[in-house]
Image (spheres, helix red, strand yellow):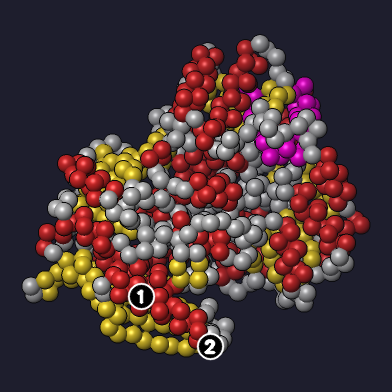
Amino acid sequence: MDDRIILGHGSGGKLMHQLITDLFFKYFNNEALKKSTDSAILEIPGMHLAFTTDSYIVDPLFFPGGNIGKLAICGTINDLAVSGAHPQFISVGFIIEEGYPLTKLEEIVQTMAFEAKKAGVQIVTGDTKVVNKGKADKVFINTSGIGIIKDEHKHIATGNKIAPGDLLFVNGTLGDHAMAVLTAREDLPLRTDIQSDCTCLHHLIENILDAGIHVKFMRDLTRGGLATVLDEIASGKNFGIEINEKDIPIKESVKALCEVLGFDALHLANEGKVLIVVDKTDETAIQEILHNDVLGKSYRMIGKITDNYKGEVVMNSIIGGKRLVKMLAGEQLPRIC
Amino acid sequence: MKYIDEYRNPEHIERLCASIRKMAQKPYVFMEVCGGHTMNIQKFGIPSLLPSEIKLISGPGCPVCVTDTSYIDHMTALSQLDNTIICTYGDLMRVPGTYTTLEKEKAAGADIRVVLSSLDALKTATENPKKNVIFAAIGFETTAPGTAVAVLEAEKIHLSNFSILSAHKIMPPAMKAIVEDDVKINGYICPGHVSTISGSEMYEEICRDFGLGCVISGFEPLDILQSIYMLLLQLKHVDPKVEIQYKRAVKPWGNRKAKRIMNQVFVAEDGNWRGLGSIKKSVLKLRPQFYKYDAEQQFSVSFNTKEPDKGCICGEILKGKKSPSDCNLFAHKCNPENPVGACMVSNEGTCQAYFKYHQYGR
């Protein structure tokens, strides 16, 4: 019985990490892959390329603040951008269930074209497959992307320059995407006005990099949320991370839903939020950029890299207590009472 | 008043902690018997704020954790029946039975669906008239009335494809069993939601027979700290009594309507608690007139339950005799993605709370 895939293997938490390490790395072993960066950083004569791929499945396909097409473009652009790359080209693969309405598909494709144009990237190749009814859930999309990395930014994806004293920023409120999708599902009798934060972050990120801010590391806070990303950064390292609950931006409505469902907002997925680790000398400069950007105006400095708590993430709770922050283990399950 | 931020106000917290520090002149052990309390105590780092004289231990307050292995075996066996949909609360999915879990059976093809309430399960039954829908009815006094309502509603609308497998439990017999088992505590932090239904009267016997203070607590950090303060005050005046801190939700008589419905549908029988063994009149079973909604009566399945892993000390942890860090399996062989004992499975389980949030500074 243990040899089957369960949903938790796709949740972005520990189970998925185990699957990647124990199965995929075992057979696909090479230097670029083993770095486990959001995008593979490839050296070809004269330039550094970032190359990434992601598959998108979401239920429902249309949710407040976006649809699967917007996710597929923004998600891949963000994976490239947080690696310090300037996104250039994208491929798109569709797996479509027999019987899916063409008008709906057109709506998804229009959104993708609009987002790609706005982002200044070209969709240059693609693939289409249709499967029998019931063999896929409406529409699945895979996108891959290529971007160019400047020499001075090639360390960002690896995070190997992170050091005690560095500061941690997020560009806005956490958990909006996860809760927008969750409450849009028909089987959950909760209605809210929460919109997904799904958006392309590369213009904001390029503003930060172009200003000469010493960015040590960036990661978009998708599946597994902030907690998973922080745990990954600290795990096995000679430094720790200290964050302050009072500084973590979460909308009141998201907070309330977390209370109702027994969820931890630090584990919720975002599609337009990035964690930025910067040198402490850039504290004021990055705040100014975030403050003046529409995608960064609700930014907060949430904590710092520290000599204490080596290998672990510790949060000062809202009431002044201390507790550990860990990666999500499986899927978050609503609790009984 | 938003009922969140106000109860997490750092200044009020600090003032209350200062009073607690002043009062705690010798070592005291308090047991909380609600998974929600356990989770919030760890989540907010409350132990790191308390003086070292005060130790909080977690009792059998997580309904998932005390659900017996044989129940999971029974449920997974039912999930193999043709034409059957199992509806369950989410956190039961990963609880290990002898050989498998509901989560793994779902992956293998069984139709197992997570619901948020018993009425969602009832709805699933009305929407799938050709399938048998079995609801995994677990939980304490908090969820038992909801199940009772679903059963009464099923009867009212003559639904013939809905049934439940009840492992509902009631709290006071377990609290009594713990002190009878010689667990040394100086007071109970009593469950908030359970008491909303059952009221405070049910703790009087424990207070009287064992001379233990019982304070019914809310779930926010200020609630929990105030309950600790109230227990300390009782100890100072050598005056154990039943008190309600969670006054905004709990009345001494509880919720009379919910109690009446629960009593109409269920009867308390002896039954197994994981880790604690059999406890007299502690498990709620359907009364005979509702047997047509009892999956135990309606479906015959066979399953083999074996004793859990020898290394697992869930039982001792549920009794508050040991802490998760005393367990050799903790965080190594037993972790949230691969739990050995039930205390690691649920969000509210003592071991998962320790694993996810364990405190610093103690």
Residue B118 pos. (x, y %): 73, 57
**Badge 1: residue crowd in 10 Å (few <14, some 14–19, many ≥20):** some
The magenta segment is B185-208
Identify the residue position indicated by label 1 in the image: A114
**Badge 2: residue crowd in 10 Å (few <14, some 14–19, many ≥20):** some
Residue B208 pos. (x, y %): 77, 21
Q: Nearer the viewer, residue B309 or B1?
A: B1
Q: Amino acid at mark 1?
A: Phe
Q: Which chain hosts label 2?
A: A
Q: Is residue B272 left or right of residue A45?
A: right
Q: Amino acid at mark 2?
A: Glu
Spatial CA distance of label 1 from label 2 is: 26 Å
> In the displayed image of the protein, which residue is found farthest to the right?
B289
Vertical position of residue A268 compared to residue A242: above or below: below
Q: Residue at x 88, y 62 (%)?
A: B156
Residue B193: name its quadrant: top right
> In the displayed image of the protein, which residue is found farthest to the top?
B237
Q: Residue at x 72, y 36 (%)?
A: B195
**What SS does tag 1 mark?**
helix
Identify the residue position indicated by label 2 in the image: A98
Name the quarter where the N terminus of chain B is drawn: top right
Residue B314 pos. (x, y %): 58, 43
Vertical position of residue B261 compared to residue A71: above or below: above
Whether residue A123 is visible: yes
Residue A207: name its quadrant: bottom left
Magenta span has B203? Answer: yes
Q: Residue at x 41, y 46 (%)?
A: A249
Answer whether labels 1 and 2 touch (C-beta < 8 Å).
no
Q: Residue at x 32, y 55 (%)?
A: A294
Foreground: disc 1 or disc 2: 1
